[in-house]
């Protein structure tokens, strides 16, 4: 572009309050910050992105929010051009010059014309990605439904004979029999109870009853889950850190179901840390993240509440990350997991109108993200009525 020493392209990150650098042209482009915040209304990026209008900066070093690193590169002026399609801002092109006042109106018109031409291409790509995602979600729903029906049938067929085994074993334990026989029976009862827990997980996975939502404080629910799990973490010498944004609003969720999800993810983190040998033992003078730690946080953005649960355990291998929510898939050793915990969590979050996904760097820990829509009591009533009419 005429008069440009650098050109960057930024698109919204998964966190919609951030713009991620996806392309850059020019010298020393590695010094550009990978993420730019949209949370401050005073930044040039926010003004251009939110208004959908070009923003021209003729003397960047004089700007109150100027980045020292960018100033050090010698940038003096810039033109921020939003990428618009179908009335929506899809991204931001930033044209930068080493010369002050290098973007008069005629140059800005040229930039805007060029960027306007790529807006529809971005929209086509976005719609195609959305279509593919919807197809994948539909296929996943059909697959999970089939597995759910199978799980319900298996659970029913196993539960009846298992109940008899446990019942008669307990009766024998209560009778006058040699201690050596009782010792063997206790093993039968213990293993039977473990099998009963697996069957209960089958039934939970297969159950299709909807959540009992109430207008609830997400932070209060998270605190209850933390209180329930804190003692377990302390016994395992794992430090639990909480960072709940006090401005997170209430929304419509099933309190007990969300606690179940948090506890399950906490338990996975605990097992990961125990497997990595990173339990905390006293104070460390090094990086605190080298100790066994779990972090839980809550934040909110327009229309959404996000919960993040992170640990610094062994992490999830890259080739397995996309499978962790599949039924019966587990990264644990034989005898330590059924592969149903996270799939049940995924179903619960979806039933509550949310999204659940995971990120991980193998050997450095995992982070689970949960997002719920911000709903009022009236919003939920409307959805419930609409569902009942079509069911």
Image (spheres, helix red, strand yellow):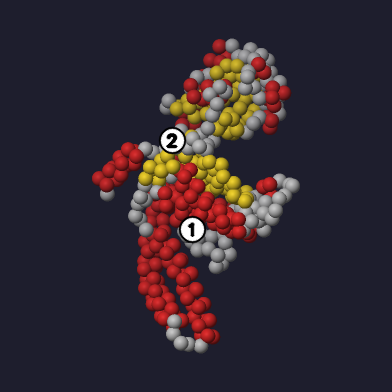
CA separation in Å, label 2 and label 1:
28 Å
Q: Give the mark nearest the N terminus, 2 or 1.
A: 2
At a point 41% along the width and 43% down the height, the residue shown is 216
Is 22 displayed left or right of 341 in the figure? right
Which is nearer the eye, 114 or 290?
290
- Residue 301 point in image, percent of width and height: 48, 34
Kind of element beneath mark 2: loop
- Residue 179 point in image, percent of width and height: 53, 85
At a point 58% along the width and 14% down the height, the residue shown is 107
| Location of residue 98 (image quadrant) | top right
At a point 56% along the width and 11% down the height, the residue shown is 105
Residue 135 is tagged as none
Kind of element beneath mark 1: helix
Residue 225 visible: yes
Quadrant containing the N terminus is top right
Residue 341 is tagged as 1
- Residue 50 point in image, percent of width and height: 49, 24
| Location of residue 75 (image quadrant) | top right
Residue 303 is tagged as 2
């Amino acid at each position: 572009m005429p008069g440009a020493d650098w050109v960057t392209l930024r698109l919204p990150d998964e966190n919609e309050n951030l713009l991620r650098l996806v392309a850059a042209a020019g010298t020393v482009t590695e010094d550009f910050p990978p993420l730019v915040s949209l949370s401050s209304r005073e930044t040039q990026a926010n003004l251009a992105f939110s208004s959908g209008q070009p923003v021209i900066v003729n003397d960047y070093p004089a700007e109150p929010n100027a980045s020292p690193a960018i100033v050090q590169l010698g940038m003096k002026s810039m033109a921020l051009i939003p990428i618009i399609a179908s009335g929506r801002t899809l991204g931001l092109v930033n044209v930068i010059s080493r010369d002050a006042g290098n973007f008069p109106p005629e140059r800005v018109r040229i930039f805007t014309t060029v960027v306007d031409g790529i807006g529809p291409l971005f929209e086509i790509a976005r719609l195609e990605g959305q279509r593919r995602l919807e197809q994948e979600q539909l296929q996943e729903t059909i697959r999970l439904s089939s597995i759910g029906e199978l799980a319900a049938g298996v659970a029913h067929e196993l539960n009846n004979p298992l109940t008899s085994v446990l019942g008669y074993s307990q009766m024998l334990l209560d009778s006058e029999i040699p201690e050596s026989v009782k010792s063997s029976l206790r093993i039968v009862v213990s293993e039977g109870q473990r099998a009963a827990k697996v069957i209960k997980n089958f039934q939970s996975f297969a159950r299709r009853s909807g959540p009992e939502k109430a207008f609830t404080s997400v932070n209060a629910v998270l605190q209850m889950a933390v209180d329930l799990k804190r003692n377990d973490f302390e016994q395992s010498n794992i430090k639990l850190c909480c960072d709940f944004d006090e401005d997170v609003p209430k929304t419509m969720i099933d309190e007990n179901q969300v606690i179940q999800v948090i506890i399950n993810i906490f338990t996975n983190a605990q097992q990961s840390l125990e497997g990595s040998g990173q339990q905390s033992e006293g104070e460390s003078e090094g990086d605190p993240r080298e100790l066994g730690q779990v972090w839980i946080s809550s934040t909110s953005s327009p229309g959404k509440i996000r919960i993040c649960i992170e640990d610094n355990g062994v992490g999830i291998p890259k080739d397995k990350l996309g499978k962790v929510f599949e039924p019966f898939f587990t990264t644990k050793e034989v005898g330590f997991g059924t592969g149903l915990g996270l799939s049940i969590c995924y179903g619960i979050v979806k039933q509550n109108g949310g999204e659940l996904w995971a990120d991980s760097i193998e050997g450095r820990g995992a982070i689970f993200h949960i997002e719920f829509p911000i709903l009022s009591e009236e919003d939920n009533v409307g959805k419930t009525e609409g569902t009942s009419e079509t069911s």
